[in-house]
Image (cartoon, grey):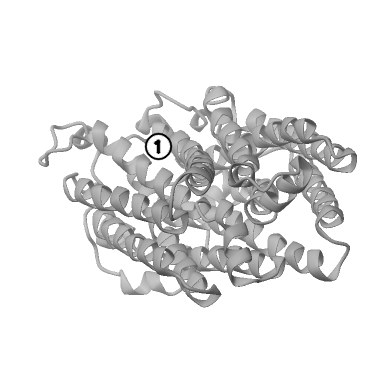
Amino acid sequence: MNHLAPHERTKPSSNPIPPRAAFYVLASIVVSFLAASSAPTPLYASYQAEWGFSPITTTVVFGIYAIAVLSGLLVLGKLSDHVGRRPVLISAIAAQAVAMVLFSTAGGVGELLVARVVQGLSTGAALGAVGAAMMDINRSRGTVANAFAPGLGTATGALVSGFVVQYLPAPTHTIYLGLLGVFVAQAVAIALIDETVTREPGALATLVPEIRLPRTVRGAALAAAPVIFAVWALAGFYGSLGPALVRTLVGSDSAVYGGLGLFVLAFVAAASVLVLRNARATTVMYTGIGALVAGVAVTLLAVDRSAPALFFVGTAIAGFGFGSGFQGGIRTVLPLTKPHESSGVLSLLFVVAYLGMGVPSVIAGTLVVHGGGLVPTSEEYGAVVIALALLALAALLLRGGPQTAPGVLVASGGSPAVEAREAERADVASR
């Protein structure tokens, strides 16, 4: 594919929105899509009270979204490398807008599931394209933004939705209609930015799911995958069963509390990306594993002692582990990709993330009903997350850490030319 050269990307834009502003427009799409994905979290109690379903249904609704995202990533993740970033993003935003209408008019679990599927497919289609587009504009800043924006979006959606549910009328309509307005504005903005890649044949072939990693990133991806799975497994818990657990610990039915656990986790995760942006990716990865284990351990202690304040302290520590673990994985792998590979590789990393987020949470929902209940299941889930993190640490130590070229893990100000040379050296070394 004929990607725009670095010097071409710095030329004045032929559209009203210049490259620097376009970068922030693209980042805002990740934020809004992830905010929309977490917006239903504080509403699950309202849906459950109105429609009378069990915690299994809650986790199925959550899990079906993860499956839909996976499908979108696998089928549509590479499409933008061939047809361009803008067509894929505009189509994904349009589908996301349709999902908001479906949410706002849902009258039962069936409609809720359909809305989640449409939302998941559009998110899966967008994540690879928008992440690659940011890297097309600025490779080093795009790498950091791909790790920062998901946490910010998840945190924003959970908290704003909680306040809407608690204090505004018709919450099951208001939050979605507000997001609908955001998506309309973003679609207009995307139409006004420059395309960052040129079209080439082979788009239909990319629709056939293919799990294949370029040789230059295989070692790094295999080292990062267990960490990414573990941190998103924790995010899956906070997004599905977390609201019920927080309300149980606090002793309140407030919807704000329902979204507060996920907000703390995701907000601290996003902040950790900025705090550690200048550290080496290997250091960030190990920091993430350590903070994840420590945070979940504190959280389990809080659940055992019914201590809400300690629970949020543990959640914040675990959130730092979530953000740094995910950032470490992203920054270990993406700088090693060539421009035409970035969308597909990023999509595969998100496949691992959403597998971690979806599968364990559905299993946990089943255990809540047919096992020991909410609190025991939460304790078992936390123990499993700690075990996953320790297994990831063992895998990294056995491999001698993530095997990446030393010059590509810059967080800001990196030269695309240097990154390309280092990726080429890594490719030669792996042969």
Q: Is residue 146 above or below residue 120?
A: above
Q: Quadrant of residue 429?
A: top right
Quadrant placement of the N terminus: bottom left
Q: 303 or 139: which is nearer to us?
A: 303
Q: 283 or 19: which is nearer to us?
A: 19
Q: 209 or 4: which is nearer to us?
A: 209
Residue 188 pos. (x, y %): 19, 50
Q: Is residue 48 above or below residue 296?
A: below
Residue 342 pos. (x, y %): 42, 50
Q: 335 or 240: which is nearer to us?
A: 240
Give the residue at x 68% y 35%: 321
Please say whether residue 231 is visible from this viewpoint. Answer: yes
Mark 1 burial class by Cα count in 10 Å: few <14, some 14-19, many 20+: many
Residue 409 pos. (x, y %): 52, 31
* Left or right, 344 with reference to 177: right
Give the residue at x 42% y 51%: 175
* Left or right, 253 with reference to 366: left
Q: Quadrant of residue 311?
A: top right
Q: Is residue 346 above or below residue 71?
A: above
Please say whether residue 226 is visible from this viewpoint. Answer: no
Give the residue at x 25% y 54%: 86
Element on which disc 1 rests: helix
Q: Amino acid at mark 1?
A: Gly
Give the residue at x 60% y 31%: 268
* Left or right, 304 with reference to 274: right
Residue 271 pos. (x, y %): 55, 28
Q: Which residue is disc 1 drawn over?
A: 142
